[in-house]
Amino acid sequence: MPKHKGTDKLQADMKTKIAKIKKQIEGGGKAGGPARQAPTHDYIEPEGAGQVVLIGAPNAGKSSLVDALTNAKVDVADYPYTTREPMAGMMDFETIQIQLIDTPPISPDLFESYLTNLIRNADLVLLVADLDDDNVREKNEFIVTALQEKKIILTHTVPEEVEDVRFVHKRTLICGHKMYDDETGARRKAIEELFPEFPMTTTSILDDDSLVALKRAVFDALQIIRVYTKQVGKPVEKVDPVVLPIGGTVEEAALSIHKDFAEKLKFAKIWGEGKFDGQRVNRDHVLADGDVVEFHI
Ligand SMILES: Nc1nc2c(ncn2[C@@H]2O[C@H](COP(=O)(O)OP(=O)(O)O)[C@@H](O)[C@H]2O)c(=O)[nH]1
Ligand SMILES: [Mg+2]
């Protein structure tokens, strides 16, 4: 910026702003320090079949998982608080993609305020618990309590009716990570006790099978089905499915293609497990994951 009388104030303003941002970065949002507000971070446009937000204590392995499972470029390091911003990436799961969001940790030293909105908007929470950490139970208890104070309840089943509408219940899948470092299985047990009845899977970056199992667990926890549509006289092609919540019907599948389609629908034929090929069904027929539907109008 050219330096002359008119720009003095502007320059001073910018200096203050830079100093403020510097302080915020150095302060790291620690309790009592300057609040690190990042309004652009509290919403990430959903993409794919579902949005999953990974949360956990520092160093649990959230970024490593997002790095291994998606195309996102995330920061992984062996010191805590490496991740400062949410970062989204797409995970391939068979014929669909699921969005994973890496986030900064939740701990007594740091709880980014925008996390609550990210969690509220997500379809699923993936809680990454570090099975290489003796304090894994306490650290995750802290997370549960900190979220509760923000009116977010992690749950294995979202209740149909809530007593207090200010609270949001978020379906949560537990991922016991670094499973090979839990020699006695005691830490896994501690997490199972903390989250009874929650779906849980154990993983290691070093074990590809465990990552494949995690993808399946995420898909299951999202409680969605994939339905493939087929044109009359054309062969079945299991690509690019319509994604519906569990319990989705033929009519809903038709609606997701076109409103007219659903209105004019006379019947459908379906191919799938436990049905004979081309079985004729009505619009209120409940579909299953992997079904192929041929609409007749
Ligand atoms: N032993 C082991 N270490 C892991 C595994 N996954 C990640 N790590 C290490 O744990 C540390 C923290 O990982 P990071 O992904 O940055 O954790 P974040 O803070 O939760 O994002 C890094 O040193 C990783 O290399 C794993 O499956 N097993
Ligand atoms: Mg990280």
Image (tube, grey):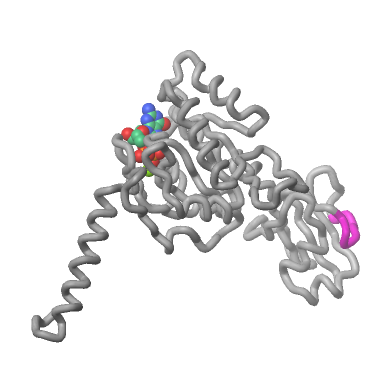
Residue under the image location 78 percent in, 59 percent down = 293
Q: Main secondary structure of the magenta part?
A: loop
Q: Quadrant of the C terminus?
A: bottom right
How many numbered tags mark residues here?
0
Residue toward you, 282 or 294: 282
Quarter-of-image position of residue 38: bottom left
In the image, taking residue 278 as reference, residue 38 lies left or right, namely left
Q: Pinpoint residue 140: horizontal percent, then vertical percent.
A: 50, 32
Residue 209 visible in the current orientation: no
Quarter-of-image position of residue 63: top left
Residue toward you, 163 or 280: 163
Q: Pinpoint residue 252: horizontal percent, then vertical percent.
A: 78, 62
> Residue 212 in magenta?
no
Residue toward you, 31 or 69: 31
Residue under the image location 42 percent in, 53 percent down = 86
In the image, taking residue 190 as reference, residue 29 lies left or right, namely left
Q: Residue furthest front?
A: 32
Q: Residue furthest top?
A: 184
Residue under the image location 60 percent in, 40 percent down = 154
Residue toward you, 278 or 287: 287
Q: Which residues are magenta?
A: 278-285
Q: Pinpoint residue 98: horizontal percent, then vertical percent.
A: 55, 52
Q: Quadrant of the N terminus?
A: bottom left
Residue under the image location 74 percent in, 46 percent down = 163
Residue 161 visible in the current orientation: yes
Q: Pinpoint residue 170: horizontal percent, then vertical percent.
A: 62, 45
